[in-house]
Image (tube, helix red, strand yellow):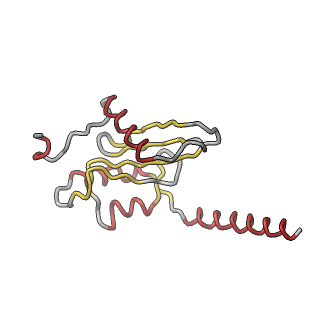
Amino acid sequence: MLLASVMIAIMYVWYNATTIRNSQIQIRDVRESFSIISDIKNDESILSMRQILSISPNLGGKYDIEQKILYSIINKHPMRADHYFLLHIDYQDSPSTLEYDVTTLVPDTLYRINLRLGFRIHPLVNRYFRQIIEDMVAKNEFSLASSYPSLAKA
């Protein structure tokens, strides 16, 4: 009886903690920021932080993004990159699921990747991400050519 009471208390605390954490997340529609992200990409006065910026949002909606992720890209210290990827990982109940879909939100700038993994699939996200990029290059949806003139000659 004592063990059951402890388990119920743990489940109650866990549920309430998840509810509190989810209530603190501010959801934004990324479509409102398309023009700002495109302007940051083309602004030469902002230092280019990286060639490809990869971010993992926790939300499953096609255009949903956390406010703090947008804040880190746009407001805090604007991060200029050639390509922005919003990577969402969804764990499935089926054991061997390994699927993805790519949505181009802003052509040649902002992409949304939904990665669905089964519970027995090892979460080797870096390898899956590389394979997704290679598939996009093969379909001519993405180019690996450097945007830097000195590197484009090579």
Nearer the observer, 129 or 110: 129
Give x and y (percent) for residue 121. 55, 42
Extreme top residue here?
139
Residue drawn where x is 53% and y is 48% of the image:
60
- Residue 146's x, y, as percent? 19, 43
Please state, as top left, top right, bottom left or bottom right, where the N terminus lies in the image: bottom right
Task: From this view, report whether residue 54 is shown above or below residue 71.
Answer: above
Q: Left or right? Give the position of 2 relative to 32.
A: right
Residue 12, located in which quarter of the rendered image? bottom right
Left or right of residue 5: residue 82: left
With 15 as the anchor, is 122 left or right in this view? left
Q: Nearer the viewer, residue 114 or 92?
A: 92
Task: Give the tally of numbered discs.
Answer: 0
Observer-nearest residue: 139 or 34? 139
Q: Quadrant of the C terminus?
A: top left
Q: Is residue 112 above or below residue 140?
A: below
Note whether 96 is above or below 89 in the view shown.
Answer: above
Instruction: Tell whether 109 sits left or right of 120.
Output: left
Image quarter for residue 138? top left
Q: Quadrant of residue 79?
A: bottom left
Q: Position of residue 134 (x, y in %)?
A: 34, 35
Q: Nearer the viewer, residue 146 or 118?
A: 118
Residue farthest to the right? 1
Residue drawn at x 47%, y 58% is 66
Residue 61 point in image, percent of width and height? 52, 47
